Amino acid sequence: MNTRIVLALALMLATLAGCNTVEGIGRDISGGANAVRGWFSH
């Protein structure tokens, strides 16, 4: 359980590190939301 939490946090940090600006973070979050929405619309 703890390993999964650590891996999830590491993935989140790596994702955020890839964004250089707040605008970039917003685009990434929006893209993630669109992907999830796509999963449920099929």
Image (cartoon, grey):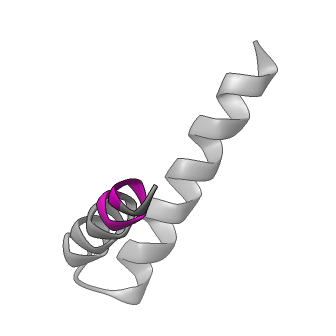
Choose between 13 and 7: the one closer to the eye: 7
Choose between 18 and 27: the one closer to the eye: 18
35 left or right of 17 in image: right
* Residue 30 lies within the magenta run: no
Q: Is residue 29 above or below residue 39?
A: below
Q: Main secondary structure of the magenta part?
A: helix
* Residue 4 lies within the magenta run: yes
Q: Residue furthest bottom?
A: 22
For image coordinates 28% across by 74% down, the residue present is 13
Q: Residue furthest top?
A: 42
Relative image position of residue 25 (x, y in whole percent): 42, 75
8 left or right of 17 in image: right
Q: Quadrant of residue 24?
A: bottom left
Choose between 39 and 21: the one closer to the eye: 39
10 left or right of 8 in image: left
For image coordinates 39% across by 54% down, the residue present is 4
Q: Quadrant of residue 9?
A: bottom left
The magenta region covers: 3-7
19 left or right of 28 in image: left
Q: Quadrant of residue 41?
A: top right
Relative image position of residue 11 (x, y in whole percent): 29, 60
- Image mark count: 0
Q: Residue furthest right?
A: 41
Quadrant of the frame with the C terminus: top right
Q: Is residue 3 above or below residue 17?
A: above
For image coordinates 21% across by 77% down, the residue present is 17
